[in-house]
Image (tube, rainbow, N blue to C red):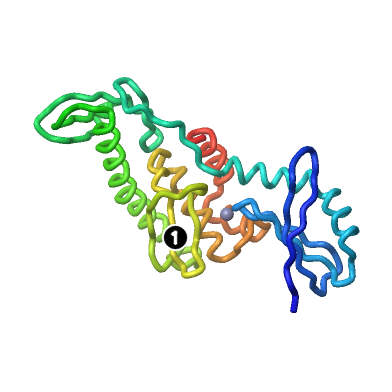
Amino acid sequence: MAATAEHSFRWAGRELTFSLRRAEVTRLRIEVHPDGSIAVVAPAHADNAAVIRRMEKRAPWIANQLDRFERWRPRSPPRQYVNGETHLFLGRQLRLKVVQGDSDEVRVDGDRLRVQVGEFNSRDTVARIVRQWFAEQAKSLLHERCREQLVIWRRHGVLPPERVIVRELANRWGSLTPSGALVLNSDLVRASPKLIDYVIGHEMAHARYPDHGAQWRRLLSAVMPDWMERKQALERQLL
Ligand SMILES: [Zn+2]
């Protein structure tokens, strides 16, 4: 019976759209989700105009939340896959060095990412080989970080997820699915191990508390006291 309707209003040049549900609450409840959606629960008898007025008052806070989640989304500049270009790997800037050889091979050699190309040395070939190498590294390294971190979380009473999935994610670093899978963005392999651990911790704390409220913060702080610094470092390193 509690139908959800879409409403929107303009504030500071942006259009803010929210879903509105009525319930037996005494005050307007506003939730801004990481995917950019805004969910509002209003008292059963408040009229729409009053809801909109209240939303306009809270608009600075809403916009701030939206901006924070926007910053949290990974963005990586397009790569050219040419000699000398830098690529982040585990928080280190590696310089691409492309050489011709007998077979395709990628390895880290000091601060170089040495890419040996067997066939004709086109930029597409280099791109394909490097992307494939990064994807393989992401799978093994992110699973390795999880194995280590999930032991720590278990000690704090948070059971490990059903499974860990490493794959490309369009706009988040990680998520915990309703079916209990921890999904990590393969792009995280660019970040330092400590910062990867933060993303794992961020999601594991969601296993207990779905939002970013006081309880979620308390749990995360108990397991990882310096999570805030790591979060900021991740934003600096990867954005
Ligand atoms: Zn979160």
**For the N terminus, which image quadrant?**
bottom right
Q: Is residue 161 above or below residue 109?
A: below
- Picture mark count: 1
Q: In the image, 205: left or right of 117?
A: right
Locate residue 110: give its quadrant.
Answer: top left
The percent coordinates of residue 229 (x first, y second) are: 56, 40
Q: Residue at x 46, y 43 (%)?
A: 195
Q: Residue at x 32, y 24 (%)?
A: 95
Q: Is residue 9 above or below residue 131?
A: below
* Along the line of sight, the residue nearer the viewer: 40 or 162: 40
The percent coordinates of residue 203 (x first, y second) are: 51, 57
Q: Residues within 10 Å of mark 1 (few under 14, many from 20)?
A: many
Task: Classify the position of ligand 1 by quadrant: top left, top right, bottom left or bottom right.
Answer: bottom right
Seen from this angle, which residue lies furthest top?
A: 84
The percent coordinates of residue 236 (x first, y second) are: 53, 33
* Along the line of sight, the residue nearer the viewer: 184 or 144: 184
Element assignment for label 1: strand
Residue position marked by numbered label 1 in the rendering: 182
